[in-house]
Amino acid sequence: MTDVPLSPATVRVLVVEDDANNRLVITRLLKLAGVLSQNIYDTDGDAIALLNTLPPNTVDIVFLDIQLPKKDGYTILQELRADPRYAGLRVVALTANVMRQDIERARAAGFDGFIGKPVDGRRFSETLNRLLTGESVWTVL
């Protein structure tokens, strides 16, 4: 939770994704991009409870699936933004809903970026680096 640009070697990533195949893909892409610290979770949507299980200030960016079984990513983002401990956390939407209105909804909700599924592995590293410098990325990979 910092405004300082991050690098793949120093960033601490949390991925909240309920689909095992998508978790595997994002894990491999993060490793290929040089991310050394990542936490990958299958969650029922209680991201704050999940973050509370981790030591304080150990996550810099969250890749958050929009379509989780119990709580959607929009609700989770609202909860994160309402909690002072996580209000400044960079949160990127992950979703298969990639129409223009989906991207605009994510932007209006307050996400810091948007990555469409399936994730394009050839462009992921570049997109990650842009996100780590603080840039908002609104694209379908």
Image: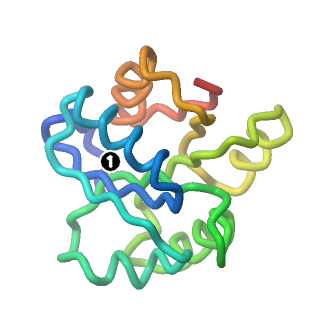
**Which one is nearer the viewer's eye here, 100 or 84?**
100
Q: Is residue 122 shown left or right of residue 114?
A: left
Q: Is residue 122 shown left or right of residue 3?
A: right
Picture layout, residue 126 above or below residue 15: above
Picture layout, residue 126 above or below residue 118: above
Disc 1 is placed on an element classified as loop
At label 1, the amino acid type is: Asp
- Which residue is depicted at the point 63% across and 27% down? 139
Looking at the rendered image, the quarter that the N terminus falls into is bottom left
Picture layout, residue 83 above or below residue 15: below
Q: Residues within 10 Å of mark 1 (few under 14, many from 20)?
A: few
What residue is pinned by disc 1? 3
Quarter of the image for residue 107 reads top right
- Which residue is depicted at the point 22% across and 68% down? 57
- The image shows residue 121 at horizontal and vertical percentages of 43, 22
- The image shows residue 86 at horizontal and vertical percentages of 41, 71
- Which residue is depicted at the point 82% across and 34% down? 99
Q: Is residue 122 shown left or right of residue 94?
A: left
Q: Residue furthest front?
A: 21
Q: Looking at the image, how many numbered discs can be counted on the residues?
A: 1
- The image shows residue 87 at horizontal and vertical percentages of 46, 68
Q: Residue furthest right?
A: 101
- The image shows residue 55 at horizontal and vertical percentages of 18, 76
| Colouring chosen for the image of the structure | rainbow
- Which residue is depicted at the point 28% across and 60% down? 59
Quarter of the image for residue 97 reads top right
Looking at the rendered image, the quarter that the C terminus falls into is top right
